Image (cartoon, rainbow, N blue to C red):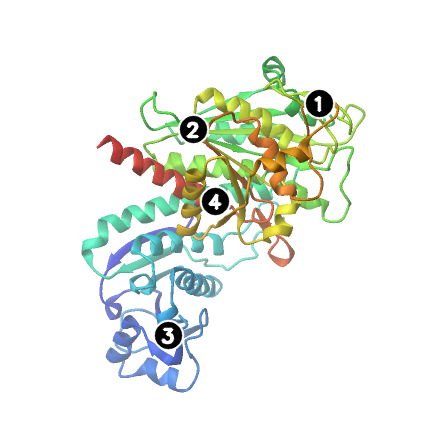
Amino acid sequence: MLEFSVKSGAPEKQRTACLIVGVFESRRLSAAAETIDQVSDGFISAITRRGDMDGDLGDTLLLHGVPNIQADRVMLVGLGKERELDTRGLIKATRAAVEALHHRGTAECVSHLSEINVRGGSIKQVLRQSVVAIGDALYRFDDLKTDRDLGPRRPLRKVTFILPTRRELMEAERYVREATAISNGMRMAKNLANMPGNLLTPTTMAEHARKMTETHLHLSVEVLDQSRMEALGMNALLAVARGSNEPPKLIVMEHMGADADTPPIVLVGKGVTFDSGGISIKPGADMDQMKFDMGGAAATIGVMSAVAEMQLPINVVGIIPTVENMPDGAAMKPGDVIRSMSGQTIEVLNTDAEGRLILCDALTYATRYKPAAIIDIATLTGACVIALGHHPSGLLSNHDPLAQEVLQAGDNVNDRAWQLPLWDEYQDQLKSNFADMANIGGRAGGTITAAAFLSRFVGDYHWAHLDIAGTAWKEGEEKGATGRPVPLLAEFLMNRAQQQKDSDD
């Protein structure tokens, strides 16, 4: 487990296995690097003059035997152009430095990058994003490998950030604690999403959620089984589960950190533990990646973990409808008409548009809480990947102020979203001759019509939909879950908690 701390002090006096200092482009030394250079009689400037470190963003160079300092080694890391350095650039440099040290068997280090002024960034942003980025960079999922001794023998275990002055110490310690909780939540989300479908089922996901109550006192978990959902009329969710031997679950997680009468924020995470497409079966290529179709559920559990660890003074409810979508003789078929929990009927035109069917009943259930806002998180549409690629999550909402809050939270933590329109005209694409609506609206605007479908189940409550189909996991050599949008949602909830505190004061 990585440990993070903060302190202040001169670079030459830091007793550490490695000291991280920055170099800007054109070999310009940062303040800490300049100090080391002076006490070492020009050791660093001699290195840069030879051209071994020009300061390109993310370049690293490990130095041994630097005289007149307490550190065993010094890591130079390139920061790019000084006037252009923003938080994202600093985080990229930090990530490059710790990755390099991790693979060189350095167990602990002290970073002076945290005291560098960046364009448009505060110490709060720098520390929070540094902790999250380091946790992400060093994450590995090797639980299922027989030989797990594949990493460094002495992995990086502790990172200390240097502050410009001691005055910021108390606040900085809080920022690091909060960021550690978010990083832990991301790791939990990634661990869940990376598990294969034969090991992570609706039942085992529910067991994992229940286990969290052992370590988080303000967290409670209730799991609704099939009979409870049948009694509630959750026929859309149950229709998706009919083709699988795995029983469906509705996981309800409650963190009550504020007064009981304070309306909660409700998060709804899509939890399809494996999506074959059902009768409308998917192509075989890359179907293994459909174990990630519970990325929204994983993110919801990760956020609830972070909120509980931080003990945020806010009421948050996480609702996770979780099923497996498989084809068999009992599976729903194209042309079936289903009556949802809301009473509205749905014509199923494609059984691979199953996420919205489990979400619609969960959203109806969410309105029971009379929430301040509802946010659903779902790997919902391939169309979102085509529209936005893999950088931002898609955002649609029936309430623009809520949308702006979500967008700003994402910008603050570099877990960005991009808003798409949700105009009434898109509702026409969901018309059905045989039911109140169809579950798909054709190829055009697929991400938007999916959100238009969901909007019919939230009533007048403020609601936002995050389509994370392009951001929940990576492919290729880096294949695996990303843990997004845990940072965005955690930032949003922290901001809401602060707003509540300010209004109470």
**Would you say 423 lies left or right of 116 here?**
right
Q: How far apart are marks 2 and 1 (CA)?
A: 45 Å
Q: Measure the alpha-carbon separation of dots 1 and 4.
A: 40 Å
Tag 1 secondary structure: loop
Q: Position of residue 106 (x, y in %)?
A: 42, 63
Sort mark 2 into few (<14), some (14-19) or many (20+) by Cα contacts within 10 Å: few
Residue 27 vs residue 394: left or right? left
Question: x and y percent of residue 482 in the render?
Answer: 54, 49
Read off the residue under disc 1: 435
Q: Position of residue 356 (x, y in %)?
A: 63, 32
Q: Which of marks 4 and 2 is nearer the N terminus?
A: 4
Check disc 3: other Cα within 10 Å, few if <14, some if 14-19, many if 20+.
many
Q: Residue at x 28, y 60 (%)?
A: 162
Q: In which quarter of the image is residue 436?
A: top right
Report which quarter residue 316 is drawn in. Answer: top left
> On the image, numbered disc 3 is attached to which residue?
24
Q: What residue type is labelled 3?
A: Phe
Side (left or right) of 386 relative to 81: right
Looking at the image, tell me whether mark 2 or mark 3 is earlier in sequence order: 3
Q: Do the residues labelled 4 and 3 touch (CB within 8 Å)?
A: no
Mark on residue 214? 2
Q: For the point 19% across and 56% down, which residue is it?
A: 166
**Could you classify mark 1 by the number of other residues whose Cα lies within 10 Å: few (under 14), some (14-19), or many (20 or more)?**
some
Q: Separation of disc 1 and disc 3 at Cα?
A: 63 Å
In-front residue for pair 142/249? 249
Q: Which amino acid does label 2 sit on?
A: Glu
